[in-house]
Image (spheres, rainbow, N blue to C red):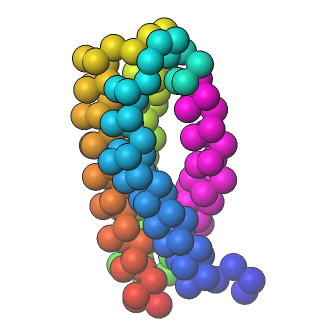
Amino acid sequence: MLWSFDKIAVIHLAATGFMVGLIWTIHVVHYPLFAYVNEPYQPFQEAHMSRITSLLIVPWGIETLSAAALLATAVGTQDRTLALVGLALLGIVVLVTGLGAAPIHGQLVESYDADLHQKLMRVDLVRTLLWTLRLIPAAWLVLRS
């Protein structure tokens, strides 16, 4: 088979690892710097949203597709459970992003607000920790194969 479970697991781990590194860089380096941007703030926030989207869309897409492929190709109960846990965590990340981080970014487009920025940092910490947890089932699946 061209796309075996083992190959998909390696691709998935690589994509997840990239996303974890990216989200930690955003959380520790990039988001804290928002507080140092002078007005007009709108061009900065719009550029951030555009550039970060273009950076993460391919690896996040690969991560998502490979997570679904892992669940579809899992043979044993343990592999299926690990794939399901990983996919569930990814679903929660998407919810936190869509219901938390994205709306805050939308509000920050209007102008910088310190309270909104702190709220973004809190929401992003949850997202960052959830994404980091995703490494556990992803790595476990590779180690098992």
Determine which quarter of the picture holds residue 49: top right
Q: Nearer the viewer, residue 96 or 82?
A: 96
Magenta region's main secondary structure?
Answer: helix
Residue 37 showing in the rendered view = yes
Residue at 45% in and 83% down? 142
Percent across and percent down for residue 120 are 33, 29
Taking the image as shown, residue 74 lies to the left or right of residue 135, namely right
Q: Is residue 92 above or below residue 80?
A: above
Q: Nearer the viewer, residue 89 or 100?
A: 100
Q: Which residues are magenta?
A: 46-71
Q: Is residue 24 above or below residue 125?
A: below
Percent across and percent down for residue 104 are 40, 21
- Residue located farthest toward the top when viewing the structure as drawn: 110
Percent across and percent down for residue 28 are 33, 48
Q: Is 58 one of the magenta-colored residues?
A: yes
Taking the image as shown, residue 96 lies to the left or right of residue 55, namely left
Residue at 25% in and 34% down? 122
Residue at 42% in and 72% down? 138
Residue 5 showing in the rendered view = no
Taking the image as shown, residue 102 lies to the left or right of residue 66, namely left
Percent across and percent down for residue 10 are 54, 79
Q: Is residue 116 above or below residue 69?
A: above
Q: Is residue 94 above or below residue 19?
A: above
Quadrant (top left/top right/bottom left/bottom right) for the N terminus: bottom right
Q: Is 43 one of the magenta-colored residues?
A: no
